[in-house]
Amino acid sequence: MAGLLIDAVTPGSIADDFEVEAGDRLLAVNGVPLRDLIDFSYFTASEEELLLEIEKADGEVWELEVERDAGQSLGLSFSAPTPARCANNCLFCFVHQLPKGLRKPLYVKDEDYRLSFLNGNYVTLANIKTPALNRIIEQHLSPLYISVHATNPALRERLLGKQGIPPILEQLQSLAAARIAMHTQVVLCPGLNDGDELQRTVSELAALFPAVQSLAIVPLGLTSHRQKLPLLTQVDTEYARHFISIWQPQAAALRKKLRQPFLFLADEFFLKAGMPFPPLKEYGDFPQIENGVGMVPLFLKEAVQTSRRAKSIKTFRATVVTGVSSAGFVGEFLAALGEKTGLDLVPLAVQNCLFGPSVTVTGLVCGTDIIEALAGHDTGSFLLVPDVMLKEGEGLFLDDVSLDELEQRIGCPVVVFDSTPAGCYQALRHCAKALK
């Protein structure tokens, strides 16, 4: 359908004054038909005089002549674009490894440069056509987040499970020439894109600095549901230690050469290896934090600060849910916080039965596994659940267990908290008030 469906109109805004309503459609700006939210932002960014073409819910079309101050918002809100579907067949694709019975949206693979620009989603650019690439350059959609995996064209086709894809280096060079900033990643598959191939990839991406601003190396994730999928090797403790011994010095060498951090190893490598994290200064401004790079070091720093500031709280027992990989440092934080506040805080490291024991991150823990882990456990007055386990805005775990169902099954109040040390502490303070 043409134009953009208006989700909401800010009260007292320009659009509200013109009696634009949620459910109307914005068809064009200054005579230019709109394809998506990006077009709206681009064509309204700096113009102070706008001609808006609005289609009302009854089909009537309005033309509104708007004059505004520079930068003044129109007060319109829209939904994000419907994602373009991914046409790749990546050897390590996590969606292909999902068990049956989860909600349908979880099985949708997106590959949309627009969401890369808007939300920081990683895309391969393997399916992008020339008009879309030209649009990125024309509208300067920057930064983009790009999954490279390997710069060797033949190896990249093997990893992505697709033949005849555009050479990634040529695409990156075109974007670099247009001054598009890029953050890149390599999903590391031992025996495939490591060793000499990784050396080549890192070298060729670093050569595109400063347009390519960062490169994260993250280990592949394997579930127990890989029936009829290619055999891949998991990153284990020995591999992680060896990998860090090689690549952490190279990251330091690149940081010195480029005069800023460029190459980052995912936190999971250090957790698997049981090795200390690099100093926080080596993460720069944390460009890859949403990719699992630097989250744990930041947590550790904030844990110390939160424990120091914490005050005594009314004594009660609470259980705090976490994933297996974070159980160690979360447990240390809870011990320090409990000592400072007088609370009896118990970490509960939940084994992942839904995806399999090799999946240990907190964000993929499901409701049923929490229920099973609590069998025979003295939960105390509250169960605290980090918000990364839940679908935003809906309060559902990956297996569709709701917070209400979890409370009913365990017979204990469930409190969701922001997944930070400060968030945990604030949630506990609210729990204490609830007991008064």
Image: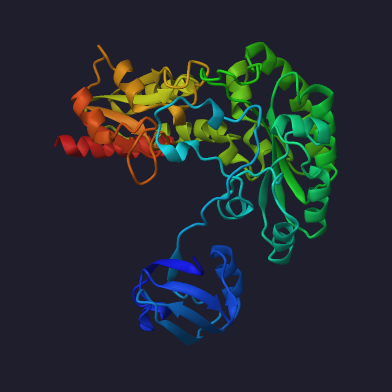
User: x, y percentage for residue 380?
Assistant: 22, 22
248 up-or-down from 421: above or below: above
Q: Is residue 186 left or right of residue 329?
A: right
Q: Is residue 7 left or right of residue 234?
A: left
Q: Could you tell me if residue 152 is visible in this image?
A: no
User: x, y percentage for residue 243?
Assistant: 73, 20
Residue placed most toward the observer, 275 or 62: 62
330 up-or-down from 51: above or below: above
Q: Residue furthest left?
A: 436
Q: Quadrant of residue 407?
A: top left
Q: Quadrant of residue 203?
A: top right
Number of marks in picture: 0
68 up-or-down from 230: above or below: below
Q: Quadrant of residue 384?
A: top left
Q: Could you tell me if residue 392 is visible in this image?
A: yes
Which colour assignment does the render follow?
A: rainbow
User: x, y percentage for residue 227?
Assistant: 55, 18
Residue placed most toward the observer, 414 or 435: 414
Q: Residue at x 72, y 54 (%)?
A: 129
Q: Residue at x 26, y 14 (%)?
A: 377
Residue placed most toward the observer, 220 or 362: 220
Q: Residue at x 24, y 16 (%)?
A: 378
User: x, y percentage for residue 209?
Assistant: 81, 47
Q: Is residue 143 left or right of residue 333?
A: right
432 up-or-down from 77: above or below: above
Task: State which quarter of the image contains the C terminus.
Answer: top left
